[in-house]
Image: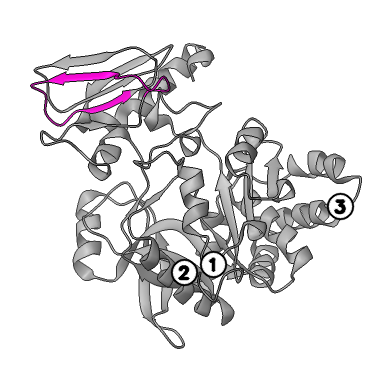
Amino acid sequence: MSENQGALYAVIPAGGSGTRLWPLSRAGHPKFLHPLTGTDASLLQATVERLAPLAAPDKVLVVTGVAHAAEVSRQLVAVPVENIIVEPSPRDSCAAIALAAAVIARREPEALMGSFAADHLIADGPRFIEVIEQAMAGARQGLLMTLGITPTRPETGYGYVQCGGPVGEGSVLAVEEFKEKPSYDVAESYVKSGNYLWNAGMFVWRVDVFLAELARQQPQLHAGIARIAQAWDSPSREEVLGEAWQTLPRISVDYAVMEGAAAVGRVGTVPGDFGWNDVGDFHTLGEVLAADSAGNVVVGQDPSGKQSVLLRETENLVVVPNSGRLVAALGVRDLIIVDTPDAVLVCPRDRAQEVKSLVDDLRNKGELHYI
């Protein structure tokens, strides 16, 4: 255990339905609740476990939707039920993170808080903790800290942060600007320059500093959150939450707070190299989980526990058996095969990102029971 155990409140926003991992990930059972880690742990459970050296279970808060609250509680038995904050409807990341910050501030007004996605994989847990500890040092100086990832390739699917010079002591760098997802050429120039990091959407700050910056840039959102927080420990919590929540703007924390804070020199970053992966699609999952000698990856085991995959003369397949049926493949390569009780997906690995468009098609056709 680190001497910092309990030094950080860890907030885990657990929302979204992971449409690129359809048909495994659904609105009612999204990707963070699935064991996609190469072990029996779900992505959410792995996230909480990873943060244990810094945040004891009573300092872990999960912000999730009404549909997922019971399953989140079932998976995280050590986290007190009052630490599972249920948002009445999705309002993007800023409202969720701000509500958690305001609830923490009632307990401890100058507490350090980190926000960490529920559905990412981290290969090097100890290194991850070291980077957070460096970010905590920057947060104690009053900076809003974002964890940047040292890029390994010119990736067009991520946003970037542009770094300036060192701030204060240690390895903290100033963040000059947040950059949108770039074209390939622009991404290539970012990586070559060495001044840009991937924006992983993980943050560390003092709650009072974050809430003050929220009030400066998003007064309406701040006022609504303050009203909810004031009623949090009173009998009127549900009523006030229901009324005020629907008035909050739908906006991400990057747009709402971090971009404007960076413009006035209030954002810092620490470069991270801890094997981060956002598990965006099945191809990516196939790259990070253990493969057989022919490059085939079987994701998880069928719930029945029976032998459920039979592969012969196949290469580089990603197979997800999740229906109780046998999945057999012969003489094929570079495919994704996902078998669930009511839907089967087969597609080339290099088109994994496009699975989201199938979900859009189903939505447009009104086939919502498949989503």
Is disc 3 in contact with disc 1, using a CB cutoff of under 8 Å?
Answer: no
Magenta stretch holds residue 312: yes
- For marks 2 and 1, the one nearer the N-term is 1
Where 168 falls versus 163 (above or below)?
Answer: below
The residue at which mark 2 appears reads as 132
Query: Which region of the structure is painted magenta?
Result: 302-320
Is disc 2 in contact with disc 1, using a CB cutoff of under 8 Å?
Answer: yes
- For marks 3 and 2, the one nearer the N-term is 2
Q: How far is mark 3 from mark 1, CA to CA?
A: 29 Å
Q: Secondary structure at mark 2?
A: helix
Name the residue rendered at 18%, 16% in the picture. Answer: 329
Instruction: Give the amino acid at mark 3.
Output: Ala
Foreground pick, 214 / 101? 101
Name the residue rendered at 66%, 68% in the picture. Answer: 207
Q: Secondary structure at mark 3?
A: loop
Magenta stretch holds residue 117: no
Other residues around mark 2 within 10 Å, as few (<14) / some (14–19) / many (≥20): many
The residue at which mark 1 appears reads as 54
The residue at which mark 3 appears reads as 231
Foreground pick, 54 / 351? 54
Where 347 falls versus 243 (above or below)?
Answer: above
Image coordinates for residue 108, horizontal then vertical, percent: 74, 70
Q: How far is mark 2 from mark 1, CA to CA?
A: 9 Å
Foreground pick, 315 / 65? 315
Camera-nearest label, 3 or 1: 1
Image coordinates for residue 246, horizontal then vertical, percent: 74, 39
Name the residue rendered at 49%, 26% in the picture. Answer: 26
Instruction: Give the amino acid at mark 2.
Output: Ile
Q: How far is mark 3 from mark 2, CA to CA?
A: 32 Å
Left or right placement of residue 187 versus residue 239 in this view: left
Image coordinates for residue 203, horizontal then vertical, percent: 51, 63
